[in-house]
Image (tube, grey):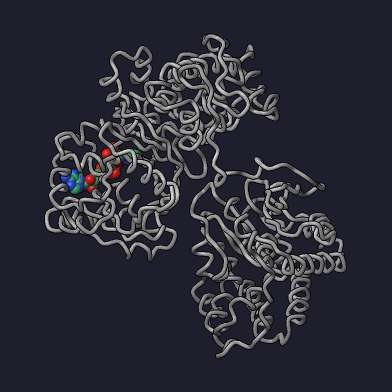
Amino acid sequence: MSDLRLIRKVCVIGAGTMGSGIAAHLANLGFEVTLLDATQQSVIEGFERAKVAKPPHFYLSETALDIRLGNTAENLSWIAEADWVCEAIVERMSAKRSLFARIESVIRPDALISTNTSGLQISLLSEGMSESFRRRFVGTHFFNPPRYLKLLELIPTPDTDPVMLAEFNQILESSVARRVVTARDTPGFITNRYGMWCMYQAVHAAEKLHLSVEQVDAITGPFLGRPKSASFRLNDIVGLDVMNDIASNLIERCPSDPFIQTLRTPKSINTLLERNWIGEKSGQGYYRREGREFLVFDLSTLAYRQRIEPDLPAINQLGSLPLPERIARGLELKDETGEFLRHYLLPSLRYADYLKEEVSHGVQDFDNVMQWGFGWQMGPFATLDAIGADKAGIPSTRYYINDTARNFDGTYSPIKKAAEYAQLTDYPVIDQASTYNVRDLGDGVKAVCLTTKMGVISPQTVEELIALIEKGTLDRFVFTSEARSFSAGFDLKFFAKAIPEERWIDIDQALARLQYLGELLEKSRVVAAIFGHALGAGLELSLSCPKIVSLVETQIGLPESRIGLIPGGRGVTLMRLYNQSSAKRLSEVAFTLALGTVAPNSEEARSLGYLRSTDLTVFHPDKLIFEAKRAALKVEPTARPEVSTAVGPLSGMIDRLLESSLSRGDFSKYDEQLGQKMKLIFSKAQTYEECLTKERNEFLDLCTKALTVARINHMLENGKPLRN
Ligand code: NAI
């Protein structure tokens, strides 16, 4: 589609869990948002809860000020300003229908209208409204919390205008940063109908086979290619009351579904509901946190007990196999793992096959829902292919063959693949060394991808990357990582070993080579594509690239002070060069570095000075590589800013910030000393070269201090910083 309909103003109605979350997500993305609830008091109360939600709804807390709050009694006319009205009020057909009747009298004739219902029939919600209203009406089923869950089910009715539907789809994908699956207007759509069923099936199977909560979570988490929340943790997160409401609604509305009895309440859920131990929001459910420990609800005694490490050898034995093979082999096991998988997984695959045509438009959509909404690596149909459908009692069928997916009539159609969602593994490896792969992204752009654990950068990584860049074959490239995170920083073990051996020259050399690698990147046509964590040396190298393209949910920072060091691979220097516009700005940056602050997202990183105004934020969780490649096609080396003296009394400003933190108790004396090192480089070094030398010298000086050694060892032993 060429011209995207312009959606600028959105009115969200209902300021509860979902409405406030949707409003925040849209405001984060730059929409002009109005949030209405029934009364002024209820909108304010709902929104106040949203402002302190955990995890936070907003990237920057001040974005909350951009949302206009009102109520449907006095401010209904505001709806007339909206390009899109998104209803998220209480899940009651009559309440929603009477609200729509009121909306209809004020809404603009070209505005889009959607409901966030999680299960009511969409066509019934718009029944009786004008044709114009019905043509523009769809379900937009966001998930909780909207900022973090990328799936959106889009549910048209028979009256929805197909052109409008396509426009809406495109807006939701491009401007609202969602992965969209069009679902059929059936009870619970795909997610709740199938996802909820799987959640219940796991509980029933555990109770039947007398397996424990820990055992089932060990089997149904990463071992099955699913998130760590697995089964019972997920139940606690969703809330047993919400699960129960959805399940009873589905039982009532799907009487002819032969599988539906699985949604009857299991014994343990019943007991927990009776005691109001409904999961995370009540502080306890299947798990209860007690101090630093988790207690577990025992499915046979129906009481809490200490957590027992599950003894399931198969999980370790098969754990390193590729997922399809792991599942296939797991199902053959004679032990508890195998028995559980046969009782849980096989019926769930049969149910997907039974449901597919009723709820979805294709097996790929069905699989995508479980991947994007539930974080499964493989949806049920890919799993059936992996184990052989006949193992689940389904006549021999393959759902995917090469690049095609099976249609319901038995024919095959090409798999939907959009270039903008391509991931690194979709591109061939054309070169490699022990710490990186080079992939060909096409159009003359390569990707240099770290392959170390958590993208850790060791002296060997630095040498290999220098050799690669000096070969001169890269031309345009993206610097990124194949790990779960872009980079957790420099290899701490290197310093922990070199310091006691007093190998000062080796340490200085390692820093000098890291600085040199940064200079090579600076002169290259390279874009850093960062995600997960971009810390320490990872950020120093990224900031050396002419441009950074960052996923918004990236944790970004130079936390070296937490281990008693300073960023010595050009980190302090670059922070000076990019923040020297004023003494105030630089003094704040010195303070940030002394504290070792890590920004929780790229928007906050920008405000802390970790990102430059020319760096890009990618809001869509699956478009990083696409956007990075796009930027790499245009990137040119940019001249490094000259060192200049910040205007204003910089030293005094830094001193005052450090002293007041010290007196407030936010800082230790040693933090203050670290801050003095930043001050020295920010205010005393006159040239770029001097900055680099001072950075290394001060770093080495810190290596000789017992407090630094204690901080490094504490971090290595406990994974947490020591503020000594
Ligand atoms: P909630 O109970 O947290 O909030 C509902 C809000 O609607 C309240 O602030 C209430 O004052 C307001 N409200 C009720 N009647 C109203 C009216 N006539 N006019 C204006 N405001 C009115 O509910 P929640 O959880 O936010 O759910 C909202 C919708 O989103 C429901 O349709 C629900 O099924 C759906 N949904 C909920 C999910 C969840 O995890 N909570 C996930 C996905 C969808």
Q: Residue at x 44, y 17 (%)?
A: 351
Considering every residue shown, the one lying at the far front of the view is: 2
Indicate left or right for 597 with 5 as reference.
Answer: right
Image x and y of residue 382, in percent: 56, 25
Ligand 1 occupies quarter: top left
Image x and y of residue 364, in percent: 50, 29
| Residue 500 in sight in this render | no
Q: Is residue 639 depicted above or below 329 in this figure? A: below
Q: Quadrant of the C terminus?
A: bottom right
Decide which of 460, 698 is in the foreground and name it. 460
Decide which of 228, 137 is in the foreground and name it. 137
Q: Residue at x 86, y 61 (%)?
A: 501
Q: Residue at x 51, y 24 (%)?
A: 380
Image x and y of residue 268, in percent: 38, 23
Indicate left or right for 444 with 115 as reference.
Answer: right
Indicate left or right for 259 with 9 as reference.
Answer: right
| Residue 119 in sight in this render | yes
- Kindly indicate the quadrant of the structure image that contains residue 398: top right
Indicate left or right for 42 with 362 as reference.
Answer: left
Decide which of 259, 223 is in the foreground and name it. 259
Q: Is residue 180 depicted above or below 46 in this figure? A: above
Image x and y of residue 288, in percent: 44, 37
Total marks drawn? 0
Q: Residue at x 29, y 29 (%)?
A: 245
